[in-house]
Amino acid sequence: MMPIPEPIKVLYVDDEEGNLTAFRANFRREFEIRVSTSAAEGLAMLEQEPAHIVISDQRMPHMSGAQFLAAVRERWPRSIRIMLTGYSDIEAVIDAVNKGGIHAYITKPWDPLDLKLRLEQAYEMHSLRAERERMFQRYRQLFDNSGDPIVIVDSHGRFHEANSAAEKLIGHSRAELLSDKLTRFIERPESLVRAMLHARSGTAFKNVEITIRNSHDRVLDCLMTATYLGRGEDGSAMFQALIKDITDRKQEELRLKKVNSELDQRVAVRTKQLREALDDLGAFSYSVAHDLRSPLKSIRSLSDHLGELAVERNDNEMNELSGRIHQGASRLVALVDDLLSFSRTDKQDIRITTFDLREAALDCLSLLDTSERRLEITLPQPGDAIVQADASMFRVVLTNLISNALKFTRTKDPGRITINGTREGEDVVISVRDNGVGFDPEKAAQLFGVFKRLHRAEQFEGTGIGLAIVQRVVQKHGGSCWAEGSVDQGATFYLRIPFAAKELSLGLAS
């Protein structure tokens, strides 16, 4: 239900009964009318129940209308006051304006329509004043109870109001502040105007950094937001300033900045040490692998010679021993070759060219032994899979992936291998799928690690470095790689690299 509006209460005081009767007869339907024949009686009625509007005749015995309205103004300032008078009472009107603060005066005889309009306007003013007072009381409550310091200052910096939080921040009582200036407590006050101009947004000045030195000689870092309120009685611009003490936050920021600076220095030192250690380790690994290669090839050659002597002498034990030495030396030579390839991959610069994935795959297949195997190899159509990458590096990648697919489909008849390449947005995704022995999907993350093998060496030969080389080359191209598969269900290896690889090649070389 809609709330029933409050009736407009009107008190009319006049010593002539006829005027009171006429007034009541004209307005009793629109307003709640009370009448009185004397000022004393009217004051007594207001004591019992105040009125929204008080109307008084000027000429009354014992107390004039101006005197009566002045008394009403003093005791019930919210009531809107109106005087009824004749043209000859202009001095009384002036007296009523000065003493009684009347809203209007109406000459006799009054016109009912005009008087009704005046009463409605008077009530509207009463409502506006009441609303303004309610808003002021609400603002005053917020102002006084705010946990943040709030002050009212003029353009000269003089305090006009301050809440308890401001008293606590500055260290002075409200009475002391009202006789002082805000600028006296601000460090470098000459820079305040410039800082406010930089932080201006309409009629507000947001987050102005100021430094306050309070009465305890403590320096506080603060943020001030000032809002323009209008002009004061002396014409000075008035501002409400809300001040936040951010001293603790500032100190924490300085501490974090210092910690981050020290951390950056330590990271830079550690990074330099790590880079030097990696360079030394890479040089050492390359040197060891390179120096091992020649002795191992010599051992393999000597084992071949030993095998030939064993055949001539018909010495089966020597022949078996030489075969085992040859096999072991060959595995070590392959491992050293892979280590050298891995090391060179990290140091080699990228030279981007555009090539057809189909042609690159055919080149790799021509170097691999596919004899005595029944294979079904599917390649993309000419021109369907164009790649931008370092051609020589990428042939190493394809050779490793295709040789893996050939190796792990050895037990399948036929072995099926599918090589494909598709554009996905700004990238090219290359896949090599097979129907081989597959792998445990929970161990997929281990596939691209150095020396990581998911199958026993006696089942499938290899050094565990090939996929690590694949990952290193793809990462140098700004891409990524991953694998999907399951045991006895085959495997698929995916490579994702940017198609516009030229833009990513700068700075990738070691």
Image: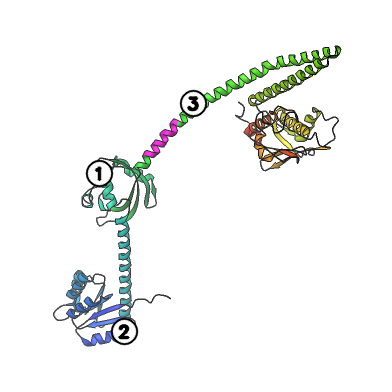
Other residues around mark 1 within 10 Å, as few (<14) / some (14–19) / many (≥20):
some
Q: Main secondary structure of the magenta part?
A: helix
Residue picked out by circle 2 = 28
Q: Going by the image, does 359 lie left or right of 208? A: right
Q: Quadrant of residue 353?
A: top right
Magenta span contains residue 388? no
State the separation of the CA atoms marked 1 and 2. 62 Å
Q: Nearer the viewer, mark 3 or mark 2?
A: 3
Label 1 with label 2: CB-CB less than 8 Å: no
Which residues lie in the magenta part? 251-262
Label 1 is placed on what type of residue?
Answer: Arg
Tell me if I can see residue 335 in this picture: yes
Q: What amino acid does circle 2 point to?
A: Arg
In the rendered view, would you say 180 is above or below 293?
below
Q: Is residue 84 visible?
A: no
Amino acid type indicated by mark 3: Val
